[in-house]
Amino acid sequence: MNKFFIAICFSLFLATSGYAGITPINNYKGTLQPSQRNATPTVKVVDYNDFASFVHEAIKKAKFATKEDMAGKTTSYVPSLKRQKQESESKKSIFEKIYDQAMHRASAGTNITRSDVAVNNLQKLQPTKVQQQQWQNPKIPTITVKMLPDNVATAIPAVEHIPYCMSSIEVLNDGLVKIVETVMVVANGEKLKYGLTKILPAKVYNGKSKMQTLDYSIVSVLRNDQPEDYRLVAQGNNVFLVPQDDSPLAPGVYTYRFEYLVDNLLIDKGDSYMLYWDVGGHGWNLVIDRLGAILNLPERKGLLQHNVLFGNENNLYSGGVLVGQHGPASMAYVAQNPLFVGEGMYLLALIDKSVMMPVGLLQKFMRSFYDFGDIYLSVIGCLFIAVSLIISWRYIKSGKKIEKFKWSKTAIVMRWLFKDKFDITAACGFLLELYKKNIIDIQQSDDTILLIKRTDNLKSLSQFEQKALSRLFPAHEMIFNVETKTRLAFTRFMKDLKSGLKREINKFNFKLCIGYIAISFAMLLLTEAFIAYFKISSGLTFATLATATLVSGLFLLLWNIQMPRWLKIMWRLFIIDICLFAIFCMIGVVSIAAAIILMVSEIIIVVAVRIFARRSGLLSYYIKDLYDYRDNLVKNVDNITLGKNFINYQAPIWVLDLSDDIIPLKEEEYYKIPIVKNIIRIFS
């Protein structure tokens, strides 16, 4: 349940302020009659067509999008007009259909009576007629219960149904609507197995091609005067008020009392508010035998026009209800016939704005937040992530000291940091390292150059280095002859080294950026937690958003994984599909715009990580260290060229292009750089 600060304030206000008392409709003395016009403005009772005409005139004043408003919107697919109409009709809620039918009938200027509807929609009404015949069957077994509200012993059908349903709708002067529903139900375990679930609309149509999102707050739920724990669950276009306890409901007669608050239900029509609400519990798969409602307003003069519609969303008609004055500022409505499965009793009322408190800026924002809160929060989260990454980048570029990770100063890594590439010089530097580790020997006699394998103990080498070396010494081969004929084997040796180097670089870059990745995704998950908090199904919303974010984010981070080009294309198409599926999952719990913004936030993180991992980013510190190391080699030439100590520096000297500057005093056996130069000459 959403618990906004403003809703809490309103609840406190309601607890301390007085309001019109609600009297059960059966206590009203005398027969219910249409209200009469008094000297003071009270209520104008109109027929359906008059009310529809009023709605039609109100709609004329609504602002519709112009061509200029739509100029910035583009689409790659334009369905036919017929298809557009079909899609539009299929997506409309019951409230939109009520509204549209009112406009259609007002435009047509015809009086569609109940008999007209029955004639024009005979086939659609057949199920209801069957239900009516079954309900009127004198052979239906009965039971005697104390019928509400007077607890008078009454015989009712001994089948699973709702014998009594009364709704009290109180419009408070601050815009909140307090609804108290008393429902008596006969349960036998067929449909009602786990308690009565109340189905509520998630949105209401405001007549401006737009839906208003409703915000619910549970006040209390009683079952046979005992408190029951209920929770709100959002699913599609509905909000379900469901019991926490899923234990089976024993057969019997139960009385439920639902009390809850609804915000953003009133539709602004300029000088008035429109209220329309299903007092018949549309969506219950049960027959309602006796149905009534009481509408309470802040002041007597507040109700301008009102009417009640019956039927299902495809067949709505007026009539069949008794209307009467219930109190100084209250109207009562009682259905004359039972409400069958799939039907509803829709109360429509027009309320004068003068009896309501002006809507404050905070209240306007909160009502806007119901509709666009996920977009607001996702934009804020995206901006915070982007700003934090920009600040981090500026900190990196400032050259200030940061935590450094240990890196392997191998020949191929040093060559890559030094020249930003892998070449044959790096491969020969790797051979010099193998010579230093006494894994191979490098010999030259005249024009013959041999690489001789000295040991099979390769534990000091990484897996990709061992694989690369196996290209030169396959199976039990111990000698590799450097000549034109073996160029292919040497090329494969270099290719394996390059692939392994890229994997090592990607791992190192990830290690460098893991802190930024963790913080950024933590901020994104925090944003999603806030979005979920303001949703009815908070747990489901956060689980969906977090799972979609983490899964798609992981694959996006692996966008540049090392693999053959043809396979990389398929891999990236797969990642795009994963991201689209993640957006589709997020759309199930948030708006399309919010889902896209959250995905954009992920892309920003991944792109920022790639920028951070560049040579001008986090790698700049290691490049600087490499150049410092190179300068130290030049400064310590005397110590390096003294004796066999040169073997330890031979590979770095070679890959850092210092072979012409640092030369041993004597060309001893361990001096292999001249041979390496000849290898390059042969394979070039």
Image (cartoon, rainbow, N blue to C red):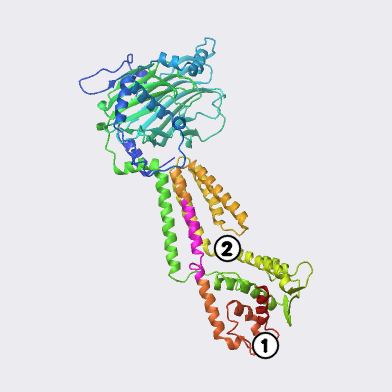
Q: Is residue 612 magenta?
A: yes
Distance from the alpha carbon under mark 1 to that under mark 2: 39 Å
| Badge 1 amino acid | Glu
Q: Secondary structure at mark 2?
A: helix
Q: Are marks 1 and 2 in contact (CB under 8 Å)?
A: no
Residue 635, image x, y percentages: 54, 85
Q: Disc number at residue 667? A: 1
Residue 340, image x, y percentages: 47, 19
Taking 596 as reference, is 359 above or below it? Answer: above
Residue annotated with mark 2:
506
Q: Is residue 341 magenta?
A: no
The residue segment tinted magenta is 600-620
In the image, 175 versus 89, the foreground residue is 89
| Badge 2 amino acid | Asn
Residue 467, image x, y percentages: 70, 66
Residue depth check, mark 1 versus mark 2: number of the one nearer the observer: 1
Q: Magenta region's main secondary structure?
A: helix
